[in-house]
Image: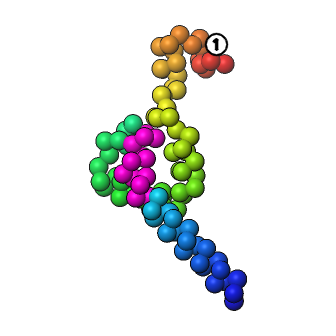
Amino acid sequence: MILAIYLVNAFLVYLMVGTVFAVLFVTKGVGRMDADARSGSWGFRLMVFPGSMLLWPYLLLRWLKSAGPRPEQNPHRLSCRGVPEDSEGEVGS
């Protein structure tokens, strides 16, 4: 019974920390990690809130490591920069 109380309390602390993180993340962090999300509406931010509240450890690490939005790395952009394609059409192999 005592173990159950500790587990429930640990989960509640996890959710409280996640809630504080999610408020900060949806107002500041999501725009730093994704350029398209920077201009996102409050409806978008409201939809991102529950996920960021539950996945806060992973998102915190990504937020701390990010120096800004990453550039796209799709085949079209790579071919425009002169990265050669192989005979099967794969870029950079």
- How packed is label 1: few (under 14 Cα within 10 Å), some, or many (20 or more)? few
Q: Main secondary structure of the magenta part?
A: helix
The residue lying at 61 percent from left, 73 percent from top is 10
Q: Would residue 25 be found to the left or right of residue 58 on screen?
A: left
Q: Is residue 88 visible?
A: no
The residue lying at 64 percent from left, 13 percent from top is 87
The quadrant in which the N terminus is found is bottom right
Residue 20's image quarter? bottom left
Residue highlighted by disc 1: 87
Q: Is residue 3 visible?
A: yes
Residue 5's image quarter? bottom right
- Magenta part of the chain: 22-34
Residue type, mark 1 in image? Ser
The quadrant in which the C terminus is found is top right
Q: Is residue 32 magenta?
A: yes
The residue lying at 59 percent from left, 78 percent from top is 9
Q: Secondary structure at mark 1?
A: loop
Residue 61 x, y percent position in the rendering: 57, 48
Residue 50 x, y percent position in the rendering: 44, 62
Residue 39 x, y percent position in the rendering: 31, 42
Q: Is residue 57 magenta?
A: no
Q: Nearer the viewer, residue 86 or 53?
A: 53
- Up-down relation of residue 2 to residue 31 (above or below): below
The residue lying at 51 percent from left, 26 percent from top is 74
- Up-down relation of residue 45 to residue 77 (above or below): below
